[in-house]
Amino acid sequence: MDNLNIGRHISGQFNEDLENVINHVMHMGGLVEKQLSDSLKAVYENDKELAQKVLASDYKINNLEVSIDDECTRIIAKRQPAAGDLRLIMAVIKTIADLERIGDEAEKIAQVALESFDSKQQDLLMNLDNLGRAVLQLLQQTLDAFTRMDVDAAIELHKADKNIDRNYDALMRQLMTYMMEDPRSIPSVMSVIWSARAIERIGDRCQNVCEYIIYFVKGKVVRHTSPDDM
Amino acid sequence: MDNLNIGRHISGQFNEDLENVINHVMHMGGLVEKQLSDSLKAVYENDKELAQKVLASDYKINNLEVSIDDECTRIIAKRQPAAGDLRLIMAVIKTIADLERIGDEAEKIAQVALESFDSKQQDLLMNLDNLGRAVLQLLQQTLDAFTRMDVDAAIELHKADKNIDRNYDALMRQLMTYMMEDPRSIPSVMSVIWSARAIERIGDRCQNVCEYIIYFVKGKVVRHTSPDDM
């Protein structure tokens, strides 16, 4: 947590508050990562039991979002943070909102595992899995950058989402062709499409978290900024 | 702004800060509403010029989000609000994030207007338009509830999203059947599907704003709460 500089506060209690909130975000991030990796595994191995487990576990992430949000509001009211401390709290509030939504997207992915696919359609699931693994790695690296408040990593990861988008577009073209060649497959291919969309959205949400890291460290809002200007 | 009670602060400057920020949110809401209604009109009338205008105007909403967000952080640092005032600022910060994303969804809808549809497919666009008008009304009512911080309206509107979801599901089934009957139509029907999805997402984001209204007035987080418990 180099960039966090939490130890510098005169009030030991304030240090503890900030350390706690960051630890809770890391715990939440770990849960979200597990939900995503379980949902991908459930789809790839067509493991309906694991998919049900993912669907039944989302409430934990929701509860964490509410409690961390509450924690942040209490810190603002009690400690009246300014400058970097306030930016940190703001970055946390926004990050947990995106993490919670990544949890929702993982649920959507898990739902695909509840369907049945014939052997030919298994190929589509393999390509979906490749996209999913790339996004899972992006999420892991983003959470890692958040923990260290590593602005250089955040900028690199922000750019990396472009590759995900490119692979997503290629997969979409493949899925469309598949439907056109075999219209009976449309319902099951559509569920793969929703799942691919959910994966792509997770990439966008990782980008958001990278923007909050940059905001905290640099004090600059980079949302809606082109990659080159960043 | 009955529930806002802005006039009660001893500091006249604080009153002015809060009034300004609410006015800016209302201005942003007005722009978002206009973007949505223009994008629906562009699709319905196949008006490519209007669609381009929507795509070219999104930056205004983005800029407003950044500036209101900044305004809120400055109010927290300078005025150290507590209790209801702090909840109001928090509700604003979250609301503008959802409004900005509604703007993004309007862009996605406008993109459909750039495609060409044959006369048979025009039927699909009409059903899309019905869904779009219902969501536009929901957005207008949600912004209205926000302006008055009307918690009863917020609870009713939160429930109303269910109707949107039902109509969305019906439209999706219709679009899937359409693709299965005429596989050559898949690329253009898919663009209608993305647009319908964007409309449905706007309904969800209106629900979020209703939750922030309830949070501000009641001091209670109702996210992830079932409609009956609300």
Image (cartoon, coloured by chain):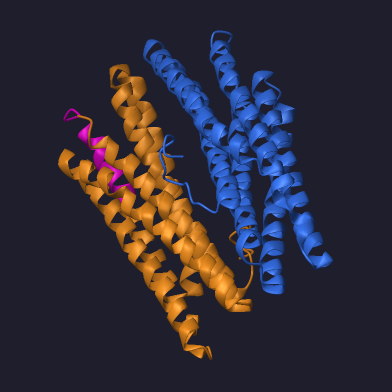
Chain colours: A orange, B blue
Q: Is residue A143 above or below residue B206?
A: below
Q: Is residue B170 above or below residue B203?
A: above
What secondary structure characterizes most of the magenta part?
Answer: helix
Q: Is residue A218 above or below residue B226?
A: below
Residue at 77 percent across and 63 percent down: it is B9
Q: Is residue A108 above or below residue B160?
A: below
Region rendered in magenta:
A117-132
Residue placed farthest to the right in the image?
B12
* Foreground residue among B199 and A150: B199
Where is residue A8? Give x, y as percent.
51, 90
Q: Is residue A158 visible?
A: no
Q: In which quadrant of the rendered image does the N terminus of chain B lie? A: top right
Residue at 37 percent across and 34 percent down: it is A193
Where is residue A85? Give x, y as percent.
56, 77
* Foreground residue among B178 and A149: A149
Name the image quarter holding residue B20. bottom right
Where is residue A136? Give x, y as percent.
33, 56
* Foreground residue among B31 and B108: B31
Query: With A49 as the anchor, is B9 left or right in this view?
Result: right
Q: Is residue A105 visible?
A: yes
Query: With B7 as the anchor, is B155 left or right in this view?
Result: left
Query: With B122 as the anchor, is A14 left or right in this view?
Result: left
